[in-house]
Amino acid sequence: MSACVPTRTTDSAHTPSAHKPHAPPPGKKFRIAGADLSASVAVFLIALPLSLGIALATGAPLQAGLVAAAVGGLLAGWIGGSPLQVSGPAAGLTVVTADLIHRYGWRTTCAITVLAGLAQLGLGCLRVARTALAVSPAVVHGMLAGIGVAIAVAQLHIVLGGTPQSSVLDNLRALPAQLADLHPAALSISVLTLAILLLWPRIPGRVGRLTRIVPAALVSVAVATAVASLAGLHVDKVDLPSWRSHALAGLPEGPVLGLVAAVLTITLVCSVQSLLGAVAVDKLLAKRPELNAGVRRSDLNRELLGQGTANIVSGALGGLPVAGVAVRSVANVRAGAVSRNSTMLHGVWVVVAALLLVPVLELIPLPALAALVMAVGIQMVSLNHIRTITRHREILVYAVTTLGVVLLGVLEGVALGVAVAVAVALHRLARTRITHAEVEGVHHVRVRGQLTFLAVPRLSRTLHLVPQGADTVVELDGSFMDHAAYESLQCWQDAHTAHGGSVEVTGRAGTRIAEPASTSHSCCRPWTPWRNHHCDRPQEQERHAGRPSGHQLASGISAFQRNTAPHVRGELARLAREGQQPAQLFLTCADSRVVTSMITSSGPGDLFVVRNVGNLVPLPGAESGDDSVGAAIEYAVDVLKVRSITVCGHSGCGAMQALLSTPPGGAQTPLKRWLRHGLPSLERMGAQDRAWARLAGRAPADAVEQLCLTNVVQQLEHLRAHESVARRLAEGDLELHGMYFHVGEAQAYLLTEGAGAEQLPDEVFDQVAPTARVKVQQAPCR
């Protein structure tokens, strides 16, 4: 199977010191972080009672839950692609497993688990994990809700002191008789367990924060056990036979088609639940930036391989099917786990408990475990999911899936849900309303819904109701238009405009959109290079066709007037009335790749921008008749009263390359005369008594990058020599900032703190990230 294991990739090309977050770095001893140790204990305290409860709910030997928890923690935790996801016996598999045990017996169910694990290995090798996520969320949540209903109804019988039946309908039919024959001892223990489960997380204040360190599941079972023992209540308790008599997997016995369906069901539920759990863990980690650098996103194909291996071993050892468990995974992340060691350690603690704590475990009353599992089943019917699905008009899919799982079974319910989801999608795709109306001489054609080939005949009929030469507005209120509809609309628009008519194509709420007849912007985005906005005709073809170069400028202006101007007109009108009041003078290079508004997320009126070759700031009196930069600085500081000045250099600067490569002497061209203002930067870089600038802790890639960084620092010193800047710095109401933009990485860096009125360090540029702060660092001298 080694050929099937996905290659582990790292970002070592970008961070030389990086290593796998779930394995010890090369050459170092294996160590377990304290956070992983404490997290593993927290997960173990949740997993132990749940594993026993799920085994009880399925009708399997209680040891089977412990075997699955241990194998899931050790093997799925070690091999799986989601380092912080915790695997074990899952509530989502309870109904399926109980049905298999009822039909085929325990040993055959173990064999089915082994075969399902092999199927998961095959899916992992085929790298189809992402395909499983294409299933509608309404189907997935409906499946889990149906399983939750079945669990809750079955466990209700044990809570009341009875025995559950084999199906949901049988359990519902037997419920009146069970209510008439209550067992007070079992009911009291169950009620006590449910009360603690409900109230423990809601204890207010500081006491509540302290008590929530201990999981509610453990507290509820522990209190119920203590009460049952001290009060001498006669209730059934956990019975763990000797491990010597533990039943292992046997050869599968039963009808072939039934066994195949069973394997497919276990594979489906285990895989979907594990993959969705891995995605959920990634979302949790995204909210914890401190872990983002240490824990990679889940490798879903590798996760399937880990789950498959765990199911093979768990089934072979007589354990329940294994899948990713949301409750334990969330607890693992919230407890501060930083690697897969916490998941594996939790498996070790389960093994220790199964071998050494059997006398303690046998004190647990079964009604307490049944109440715990019933609460988990009720929680699987999530009101938040129902509200979200209703908002997206998927409630029919959810309801059909849930009822199908409850009444027919998991595989049948999921198949029904998928069929309804497809039918709903086709219905939405085919249902399109097209209307025509004339308002004040303007013809309005409104399209509501998705515009596909199915709607082309109606669209064509409606468009031909518009008289030739009329002004027309076509409003498209939908999110999809296929090629057939696009061509039909385009051909009609060409013909209509050729006869003197006008056509304006708008989106929802009347927002104008690009006309389908014009493809000049059909594949572009706001950040698309200007020369590539003619996506259908590359620049070379434009030149060969003899089209004037001004066509691009005119086309760009037209696109601005059509798409951008309506959005900024109000703001520009305000600025025209009130005048400009920028907060910052931004001095940067004239390089065409440095787009100031893009890299600073600024808009009209935010920046007073000065651009020149090499982002140079000539010293006062050194400009030789060209005072443009000094005049801009004086105007920005004294008239506009900017509060900060930023000097921004960039990678691959042509001016810095010219400084390094141009020999002294020769004809004094305008460019050479200008670049003399950069000679102090060149001298600064070569000085032996100065520290070289560093970029986010690393040395520059080459001499050009080093000069680009040094030049930013040097030009900041030149700024201080200007009288207006020095005066404002002394008054304390002006700040200077150095910035470096790496074009190839699309990454901005800021000079570290201290670039104010006191001292200007010239060593370190720190990376600017959405969640990172710039920190002061001291870089070693060369």
Image (cartoon, rainbow, N blue to C red):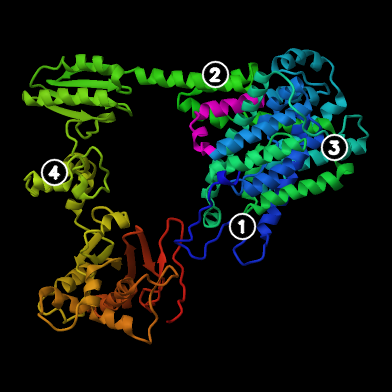
Query: Which secondary structure lies at badge 2?
Result: helix
**Left or right: where does residue 526 sit relative to residue 292?**
left
Q: Please, what is the three-letter code of the amino acid marked with disc 1? A: Ala
Q: Callout 1 environment at 10 Å: few (<14), some (14 to 19), or many (20+)?
A: few
Q: Earlier in the sequence, mark 1 or mark 2?
A: 1
Residue drawn 65% across and 49% down? 78
Which span of residues is magenta-colored? 126-149
Marks 2 and 4, how far apart in space?
A: 52 Å
Marks 3 and 1, how far apart in space?
A: 37 Å
The x, y position of residue 418, in whole percent, is: 51, 22
Q: Which mark is residue 23?
A: 1
Decide: marks 3, 2 in contact (CB < 8 A)? no
The x, y position of residue 761, in whole percent, is: 39, 77
Q: Is residue 593 visible?
A: yes
Decide: marks 3, 1 in contact (CB < 8 A)? no
Q: Earlier in the sequence, mark 3 or mark 2?
A: 3
Q: Which mark is residue 364?
A: 3
Q: Please, what is the three-letter code of the amino acid marked with disc 4? A: Ser
**Left or right: where does residue 70 sit relative to residue 642?**
right
Magenta stretch: dominant secondary structure: helix
Residue drawn 32% across and 78% down? 730
Marks 3 and 2, how far apart in space?
A: 40 Å
The x, y position of residue 561, in whole percent, is: 16, 42
